[in-house]
Image: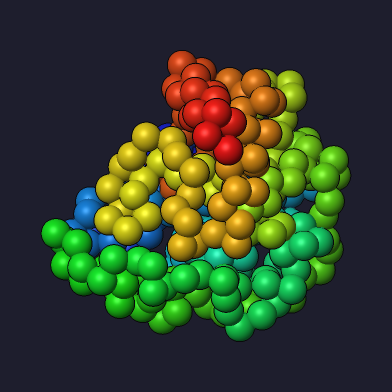
Amino acid sequence: MTQLEPGQQLVGRGPVAVTMERVADDVWLMRGGAIPPLVHRIMNVYFVEAEGGVTVFDAGVRSMARHIEAVGRAMGGISRIVLGHAHPDHRGAAARIDVPVWCHEDEAGYAEAADGQPYTDFSSIPAWTKAGPARAAIWTMHHAIWDAGPVRVERTLAEGDAVAGFEVVHLPGHAPGQIALWREADRLALTSDCFYMLDAVTGEPAEPQVPLDPFNLDTEQARTSVAKLASLGAVTCCPGHLGPLTEEAVAKLEQAAGRIAATA
């Protein structure tokens, strides 16, 4: 059993700090990856305590690697990292942590490639926002700051597979092999980037929405995956950035899915 306390700041100050909080039975959320001048930590990494060790779902950015390792040790040891998908802000620390990596079978080629997100259309990202340069800053973060590089995938997953008391749900579109982990017992979903709760350009919090088109392999497929996730009837959805969505807020996701269906 972990000795960590909810809201505990673990290491460092400012953008290099991370915090931990309990989001459900045996499930902890690490928040990290702050981007100055924003004060909130926008990268989420989940720790699932189960028989046989800790499963880490998503691996944040590379600066979080030492924190993930430290928390894993405090919780009794990391058995595996499961990637929700292979984008740099989700596989970022995995290459620096010496544990097996699992991902969906459709994502393995991207996880093992130098660029885990080659379909990103950086030309469609605004060059500037009120906060300053956007396109160049986002490219730099993806390719020079967040990502520790490719990983070797030890095991691939498919829809319906069991992982640490959860079931794999395939939610493609944002990435070809994006997955959520779904636990029927308490209707908890760890959802990676099936939906965003931030503006992907500014990093500011936002209402639940389909991921921004330039970052998706197939935005129409991503819309369908939001509706699929909403149909599970989750009480809590824990996304890849910010959140979680609790029972009342999940209604917003269901409304978003309805709007998606109406406009598809």
- Tell me residue 23's x, y (percent): 52, 31
- Tell me residue 234's x, y (percent): 62, 24
Q: Is residue 107 above or below residue 205?
A: below
Q: Is residue 103 left or right of residue 88?
A: right
Task: In this rendered view, identify the residue nearer to me: 126 or 181.
Answer: 126
Way the structure is coloured: rainbow
> Can see residue 117?
yes
Which residue is at a point 56% across and 65% down the rendered structure image?
87
Which residue is at a point 68% across and 46% down the rendered structure image?
171
Task: In this rendered view, identify the residue nearer to me: 262 or 23.
Answer: 262
State which quarter of the image contains the N terminus. top right
Task: In this rendered view, identify the residue nearer to me: 39 or 170.
Answer: 170
State which quarter of the image contains the C terminus. top right
Q: Is residue 158 above or below residue 66?
A: above
Q: Quadrant of residue 160?
A: top right
Q: Is residue 117 left or right of residue 41?
A: right
Task: In this rendered view, identify the residue nearer to me: 146 or 221.
Answer: 221
Q: Quadrant of residue 97?
A: bottom right
Which residue is at a point 77% across and 43% down the rendered structure image?
168
- Tell me residue 177's x, y (percent): 71, 57
Which residue is at a point 81% across and 61% down the rendered structure image?
105
Q: Is residue 124 above or below residue 160?
A: below
- Tell me residue 251's x, y (percent): 49, 19
Q: Residue furthest top?
A: 248
> Can see residue 26?
no
Q: Is residue 39 left or right of residue 30?
A: left
Q: Is residue 217 left or right of residue 138?
A: right
